Image (cartoon, rainbow, N blue to C red):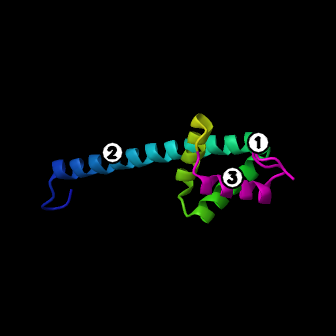
Amino acid sequence: MGPGSSGSNDDSDRVFELEAEVQQLKEAVTSHAVVDQAIGMVVALGRVSPDQGWAVLKDVSQHTNIKLRNVAELILVWGRDGEIPPDVRAELEDALDRHGPAQIPEAPRD
């Protein structure tokens, strides 16, 4: 310890820093799980590869100006409740057209 420093204050600061870091890691893991689940839904519903599913999520995020994690959450809600904002659904269909072989079921191809 340097001169004038208090061991207990340094320890308290370090504990606070570690608690904040643990919280950030927990949020990152949760966010990653949400995104992975949404990719899984896009893969299943759009009949695309996981890489294409990731590209679809990124496209929807960029074209709607909604954070990727929030797009993923909207897709999970859609899978659970059948509700999705119309602009997000339209962009999802467009992104699947760009990246995959088929549209979302219920949206027949011409």
Three-letter amino acid code at the position of disc 1: Pro
User: Looking at the picture, how far across and down is residue 26, in whole percent?
Assistant: 44, 42
User: Spatial distance from mark 3 to mark 2, Cα to Cα?
Assistant: 31 Å
User: Spatial distance from mark 1 to mark 2, Cα to Cα?
Assistant: 45 Å
User: Spatial distance from mark 3 to mark 1, Cα to Cα?
Assistant: 19 Å
Front position in the image: 58 or 29: 58
Circle 3 SS class: helix
The crowd level at tag 3 (other Cα within 10 Å; few <14, some 14-19, many 20+) is many
Q: Are marks 3 and 1 in contact (CB under 8 Å)?
A: no
Q: Specify the farthest residue to the top.
A: 80
Q: Indicate which label's residue lies in the foreground, 3 or 1.
A: 1
Q: Are marks 1 and 2 in contact (CB under 8 Å)?
A: no
Three-letter amino acid code at the position of disc 2: Glu
- Name the mark on residue 54: 3
Whether 22 is among the magenta residues is no
User: Looking at the picture, how far across and down is residue 74, in whole percent?
Assistant: 56, 47
Front position in the image: 64 or 59: 64
Q: Is residue 109 left or right of residue 8?
A: right
Image: magenta residue range:
84-110
Front position in the image: 27 or 97: 97
Circle 2 SS class: helix
Judging by the rendered image, the residue that carries numbered circle 2 is: 19
